[in-house]
Image (tube, rainbow, N blue to C red):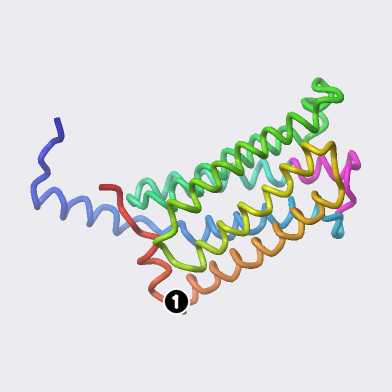
Amino acid sequence: MARYTTPDEHLADADETRGVANPIPLGLCVLAFTTAILGAYYAGFIIPYQTTGSRMAVGAIIFIGGIVQLLAGMWEFRRNNTIAATVFASYGGFLAALGLVFMPGINITGLLGGASHLALGLFFLCWTILSAVLLVGSIRTNRLFVSILGLLFVSYLFLTIGQLARDNRILLGIGGWLGILCALAAWYAAMVYMTGGTRNLQESLHMPAR
């Protein structure tokens, strides 16, 4: 049975939440940073593709970024912001797991052998489906945020197909460049938010659970 909350308790909760800094800029910046690194890796832009050193560097970066992203999501849950919390926390967990896969020292891909591309394709496929769910769930929020999730979805769709096609470089490259575009959009959204260019970004992302 749902517990009745008095008006005084509502006010106390609001006052307590008001003292917590808003983690949306942090979540957007980390989303942009990690997506740009991963996109550059698959696009072969600056970072060489499929070398041991680059995989180790990319793995460590997105693993740490995933942890920070997860923390941003937890802070959004603390602020009762369901949509942003779900996006940041989900993506943070995905990135942390992906970072472990990329790091050669853990040797996950070595254990999978020739099926590593298919396993990674399945991993990307699950995240692509989740990205679609997040995209539909955020359709009533700010257009810029929806655009970021839309680019993220299409980027991982191409990465999924590229991996399932046994490391198809053309498809993976397209997915990488789309990831870079997604990162640029996320950086722009973070800048708009921090400079106070619009109040709608904050208000439309804050859609508490009912």
**In the depicted structure, whether residue 59 falls above or below residue 36:** above
Q: Foreground: 153 or 59?
A: 153
124 falls in the magenta region = no
Q: Foreground: 30 or 115?
A: 115
Q: Position of residue 139 (x, y in %)?
A: 44, 59
Q: Foreground: 26 or 38?
A: 38
Q: Which residues are magenta?
A: 47-59
Q: Residue at x 51, y 74 (%)?
A: 192
The residue singled out by tag 1 in the image is 196
Q: Quadrant of the N terminus?
A: top left
Quarter-wise, where is residue 107 in the image? top right
**In the depicted structure, whether residue 47 falls above or below residue 53:** below
**In the depicted structure, whether residue 178 falls above or below residue 137:** below
Quarter-wise, where is residue 122 in the image? top right
Main secondary-structure element of the magenta-colored stretch: helix
Q: Residue at x 77, y 30 (%)?
A: 118
Q: Residue at x 54, y 48 (%)?
A: 132
Q: Tag 1, which secondary structure?
A: loop
**Residue flagged by tag 1: what amino acid is it?**
Gly
Q: Residue at x 62, y 59 (%)?
A: 151
Quarter-wise, where is residue 180 in the image? bottom right
Q: Is residue 54 found left or right of 73 in the rendered image?
A: right
Q: Position of residue 164 (x, y in %)?
A: 77, 36
Q: Foreground: 179 or 52?
A: 179
Q: Position of residue 144 (x, y in %)?
A: 51, 68
State the residue lying farthest toward the bottom. 197
Q: Position of residue 113 (x, y in %)?
A: 85, 23
Q: Is residue 49 found left or right of 6 in the rendered image?
A: right
10 Å crowding of disc 1: few (<14), some (14-19), many (20+):
few
